[in-house]
Amino acid sequence: MTMNRAFLCVLMALIALSALWANGKPAKRYLGAGWDVGALPPVDMAQSLDLLAKLPLDGIRFSFRAKFPDGTNITSSTAMDGRKWPVDVFDPQFDDVRKITALPNMKHCFIGVRATPNKRLAWTDDAAWEAFAHNMTVLARAAKMTGVKGLSPDYEDYRHQFQYSLEDCDPPLDETLALARRRGAEVHHAIFAAYPDMTLFFWHFLDRHFPHHFTGFTDLPQDVRMRQDLFIAYLNGLFDVLPPTARIVACEEDYKYSAARRDFYKAIAEEKQFNEQLLDPVHRKKHRLQVSLGFAIYLDAYRHDNQKSQWALGPDRHGSFAGHLIEDVEQATRATDEYVWFWGEKRTYVPWRNPGIASGIYSCRQYSGDRRQTWDSLFPGFHDSLFRFKDPCGYARKAWASVLSGGGDGNVIAGSSCTSLDGFMTWQK
């Protein structure tokens, strides 16, 4: 074989391999969530499209607000309140959402919804569960019609109603487990009927009650039963009706952003090894094929007011809070299947223009004082690091192009007084 033919073969092999890599593992993506994007209606965020377009995020988690004719509020927190929403209640806001999802970096937006009630639903109450399924369908329809990737249900029990645990008012355990599975199937059948190829972005999934403590158990389903947990049965109902076109993202909060759990590689390994054992064996193949695992980063933890708090992460070994955040984001990005999501409270993702004015909704908690400051200004280098972590090759190409065009740092060798030798190496050209 001549040298030219050998070179051609190697080149063709590299092209084939790059095609495989391009179509293989999904790209790493960042989702922004928190008080600002969660509270501001789409009409307000649409006033700052140019600012959103500059973010290193791939989407945001936002919510709708509306009212019933009698003035009662409809929010992301009222989906389980037992009252059916009008199907077209959010339609007037669709154009503003489409403006957001039309941005090149906003193709992975999700509609947030709280999937725990303000008052516990009886598992035997057909009407209440039908209303919840209907309201989730309204949101699924809204997502499909606006280019939103899907829904992001939050199953944290904010009102301490213990919906997904057996209570004294419930039927016997076996009967309630069957009911929970049926309700999970009913709710998600309605969702997928409205949006068959949607993505469900869970903040709490299989490890909602069972975080990384599985290694001492040999029979996980029996442990679930012993705890009288109903959530796993509910999720089995989801898998009963999960179509092959839909995806689930288990970017589980599970306090992964607490000080005790910074080993993302260990966490992802344990989740992949143990979590699917909680499911009905008939659904484990679906879990492997259609569920991706990811991580949460709590931004406020890196500048927590109380450094003795369990949420406070403190500075890195060099005394830098930003450095600690960036180190953790880098590891989370490498370990995740696809998504890392951020939760932020006391700062904002962008300096919103007239927040709350367009919609007539203004919240002092979100936008007063230092809470007008952005996360990137609080943590210098944060945005630049996100661009670098999720696309290192693209970032390097841009940096090299900047150097070649004279816009970079040039020779950055400390203390160097040398002049470049002509043709010394190709990398000096």
Image (spheres, grey):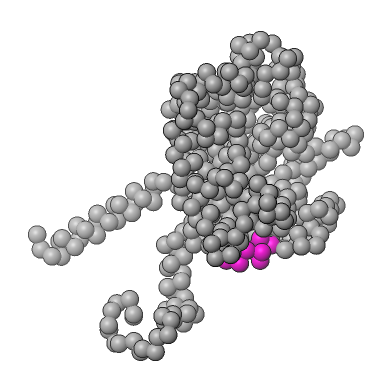
Q: Position of residue 147 (x, y in %)?
A: 61, 45
Residue at the spot x=41%, y=80% of the render?
413
Q: Position of residue 428 (x, y in %)?
A: 34, 80
Q: Is residue 197 visible?
A: no
Q: Position of residue 101 (x, y in %)?
A: 62, 51
Q: Nearer the viewer, residue 346 or 77?
A: 346
Q: Residue furthest right?
A: 70
Residue at the spot x=75%, y=48% of the render?
39
Count of residue discs: 0
Which portion, as a residue range, is magenta?
374-382
Q: Is residue 272 visible?
A: yes
- Magenta-drawn stretch contains 327: no
Q: Nearer the viewer, residue 303 or 131?
A: 303
Give the vertical position of 404 relative to 214 (above or below): below
Q: Nearer the viewer, residue 189 or 34?
A: 34
Give the vertical position of 344 relative to 407 (above or below): above
Residue at the spot x=74%, y=35% of the render?
158
Q: Residue furthest front?
A: 308
Answer with left or right where residue 350 lies relative to residue 149.
Answer: right
Which of the 4 quarters of the picture holds residue 161?
Answer: top right
Give the vertical position of 386 relative to 33 (above or below): below
Q: Nearer the viewer, residue 375 or 71?
A: 375
Q: Position of residue 289 (x, y in %)?
A: 44, 33
Quarter of the image for the N terminus: give it: bottom left
Answer with left or right where residue 22 lies relative to residue 253.
Answer: left
- Magenta-drawn stretch contains 376: yes
Which of the 4 quarters of the picture holds residue 195?
Answer: top right
Residue at the spot x=81%, y=59% of the render?
368
Give the vertical position of 226 relative to 274 (above or below): above
Quarter of the image for the C terminus: give it: bottom left
Q: Residue furthest left?
A: 1
